[in-house]
Amino acid sequence: MILDVDNLTIRFPFGRELRPVVRGVSFQVAPGEILGVVGESGCGKSITNLAVLGLLPPGAQVTADRFALCGQDLLAVGRRDWPTVRGSKVAMIFQNPMSALNPSLTIGTQLIESVRKADPALGRRQREARAIELLEQVGIGAAALRLKSYPHELSGGMAQRAMIAMALASRPALLIADEPTTALDVTIQAQILDLLDRLRRDNGMSVILVSHDIGVVQQYADRIQVMYSGEIVETGPIGQVTQTPSHPYTRALLQSLPGRVGARPKTPLVTIRGMVPPIELAIEGCRFASRCDRAEAQCQDRPPVARRTADSWVRCHL
């Protein structure tokens, strides 16, 4: 397995105490696989991925029965050793390229620096040639000229392609795409997602695709992981989970998609009532119970235990 996570819990300091914000998360990412991660804001998707990169804020506590990337125990990685893990084994594409890129440096300066860190033995001309190759690989034309451009001179789609090129510089085994199309229009979104899928196949990478939109994940992922309020509530093969969802939250996400199968024209959009509870709030029963139309007394009183099959599981009393 490229990434093997078992019973991962992340705690943040709140006042004088540490409270869990991600609880007992377990999942795996196989070589060459795209794992889609979906859920509303505040469900713990980004926090989990930042833990994989060692980028949690000071004071955060990470515990797990197993937390391994390419066979390396991430719990044993010291602060000075994390730079050797980031890039070489895992890289991340952030939501907004315009805020992730340095506005005062050219694309070439930032990309060539990534190339230099990935392979310090390369000379100056070799680093520049590699940077041009990476830009061409992600579909940026006139790559040599674009090296001289500043981020504000690029469109949103081109800036995101430049971010992808920087992530690929060190040939990571795992690429985490955290809402990579949030700031892009629909046409460019499809281009970026198609690009990621092609690069995954060409480079033999694994990808974690994080999105609010279960419809996007449905088109590209091999497996899906549905998160709610710091927990995984359902996971399994993409076709099984989206066609026959078991958890009420998964069903609600699918029903809220515009143009869902079976909906009549001009049917009002379905919404999920209420809000995600604060991720640090302690709740005795199911964390989705206050928003669930099928909730029973047991859902309020005790947390559900995951029910497993051969290749999937769901955390629900019902």
Image: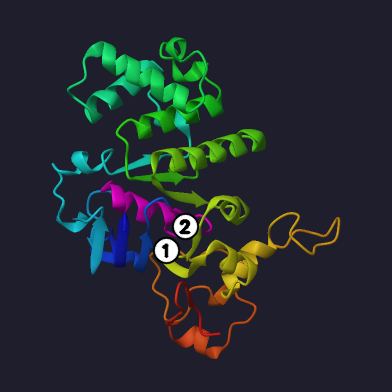
Query: Percent x, y for residue 286?
Result: 48, 78
Query: Percent x, y for residue 110?
Result: 34, 22
Asked whether residue 273 is in view, the answer is: no
The residue most toward the bottom is 297
The magenta stretch spans residue 146: no
The amino acid beneath tag 2 is Gly
Q: Do the residues labelled 1 and 2 touch (CB within 8 Å)?
A: yes
Q: What stretch is highlighted in magenta?
A: 33-56
The answer to which of 70 and 252 lies nearer the viewer is 70
Mark 2 lies on a secondary structure that is: loop
Residue under label 2, please give it: 42
- Say which quadrant the C terminus sits in: bottom right
The answer to which of 1 and 229 lies nearer the viewer is 1
The answer to which of 263 and 194 lies nearer the viewer is 194
Distance in Å between CA atoms under marks 1 and 2: 6 Å
Q: Determine crowd level at label 2: few under 14, some 14-19, many 20+ residues with C-alpha closer than 10 A.
A: some
Above or below residue 165? Residue 292 is below
The circle drawn on residue 139 is none
The circle drawn on residue 279 is 1
